[in-house]
Amino acid sequence: MNVLPPALARLIDSLNRLPGIGRKSATRLALHILRRSPSEARELARDLATLHEQISLCSNCFVFSESDPCGICADRSRDARLICVVEEPADLLAIEKTSSYRGHYHILHGVLSPMDGVGPEEIKIGALLERVRKLEGGEVLIATSSTVPGEATAAYLISRLKRLPVKVTRLACGIPMGMDIKYADELTLARAIEARKETA
Amino acid sequence: MNVLPPALARLIDSLNRLPGIGRKSATRLALHILRRSPSEARELARDLATLHEQISLCSNCFVFSESDPCGICADRSRDARLICVVEEPADLLAIEKTSSYRGHYHILHGVLSPMDGVGPEEIKIGALLERVRKLEGGEVLIATSSTVPGEATAAYLISRLKRLPVKVTRLACGIPMGMDIKYADELTLARAIEARKETA
C-alpha cells in the first residue's frame, strides 16, 4: 500500500490534520491540487506561509487583525461604549454579517470549561473587566453560544460585570426565523414562551 | 462587512477554490490555521509549494510519481501482463487498498464526454493502445466507474481493444457487500440478477 509518492503523502498528512478533513477528503484535495497548475498551489502556499507574519491580535478586542488597534476598534463611526463579548473570531464575523451591530467587540478566545482546565485566567476575561472598568455607563452585550459552556461563561461574566457601572445584556433567545413551531425543541420553545412579547 | 484582515481574506479565497470547500468551511479552516502555531502553517505551505516540483506523471501508466517509471511499473513482483485501466489516480489508490490486485495500471486522467469536448485524444487512450499493442496475450481489466460517462468510456475502450490480441475484462457488478437487498437500487439489483452465479 506504499503507492503514494512521499511528497503527496506529506501533503495529505498535513491536510488531514485540519479540522473536519478526514483522510479521504485530504487525499481528494491533494490530488485536485496536483491536477491544477503549480501556480495555484504556490499561491495557496504563499497565503499560508505569510498568514501568521501579517496577522496578530488587536490589543484592545483580541480579534485577528493586520493593524493594532484593529479596523473595528479604530472606526470612529462605531459606538465604543457598546462591547459585544463573543467566544471566537468566527462569531464576530457572523454578527458583522447581519449589519445590525455598530458597537465594538471583545473576543474571549474560548469558553470556561473547568473539566478541560480552562478557567477565567485562560481566556480574555481579565482584559474584558479592565476595558469595562474604563467604560463607565456603557453596555456589555454577552453573545456567547447557548451551549452548556457558553451559558456557564455568560453566567460567570454576569457575576463579575454586575459590580461594575455598566448595563449587561444578552442576545434574545427564541424561535429561529423560518422555523416551524412543531419542529422547535422543547427548551427553545419554553424560552420563547417565557420571553414572549406583547404585540404593538 | 470588510472586517477580515486582507491576509486572512486571501487565504479564505484560496481555500474556497478547492473542491467541496465552501465559504464557511474555508473561513473555519483559515481561523483554525491562524489559531495554531506558525510552524504548522509553514509546514503545510512547504508541502504545497514543493508538490508539483517533486511529482510528475509516470511515462508508462500516467500515475503521479516522484520517479519515472513509478514504483508500481518498476516493481518486478507485479504482473506486467495485466493492466487495470482507471479514470484517475484516486481510483488506483482505492484498488491498491484492497490488496487484491497485483498487476499494472493505466490512468486515463478523465472519461469520454463529448458534451464537454473530451474525446479519445483528450485522455490517455492512445498511450493505452500503444502499451496494449506491445503486450500480446495479456489482459486489460477495465475499471472505469459505473456512471454514464464511465460506461461510455468502457464501451469505447472495448471497441478499440477487441481488435488487439488481449483478453479484455471488466469489474463485476452486483450488490455491494453489507447492503440490505431492500435498499439496493433497481439497476444494481437487475445487474446482480443477470450476473447471478451458481453456488458451489
Image (spheres, coloured by chain):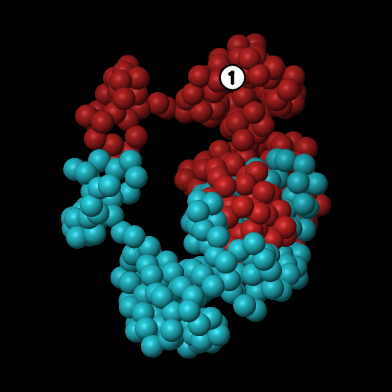
Chain colours: A cyan, B red
Q: Is residue B137 left or right of residue B169?
A: right
Q: Is residue B108 above or below residue B156?
A: below
**Chain of residue at mark 1:** B
Q: Is residue A45 above or below residue B133?
A: below
Q: Residue at x 64, y 65 (%)?
A: A72
**Residue type of the residue flagged with mark 1:** Thr
Q: Residue at x 65, y 74 (%)?
A: A58
Using the image as rendered, state which of residue A107 and residue B167 is in the foreground.
Answer: A107
Q: Is residue A114 left or right of residue B115?
A: left
Q: Is residue A192 left or right of residue B112?
A: left
Using the image as rendered, state which of residue B125 and residue B74 is in the foreground.
Answer: B125
Residue A14 found in image quarter = bottom right
Give the mark count.
1
Residue A108 in view of the camera: yes
Mark 1 highlights which residue?
A: B153
Q: Residue at x 67, y 64 (%)?
A: A75
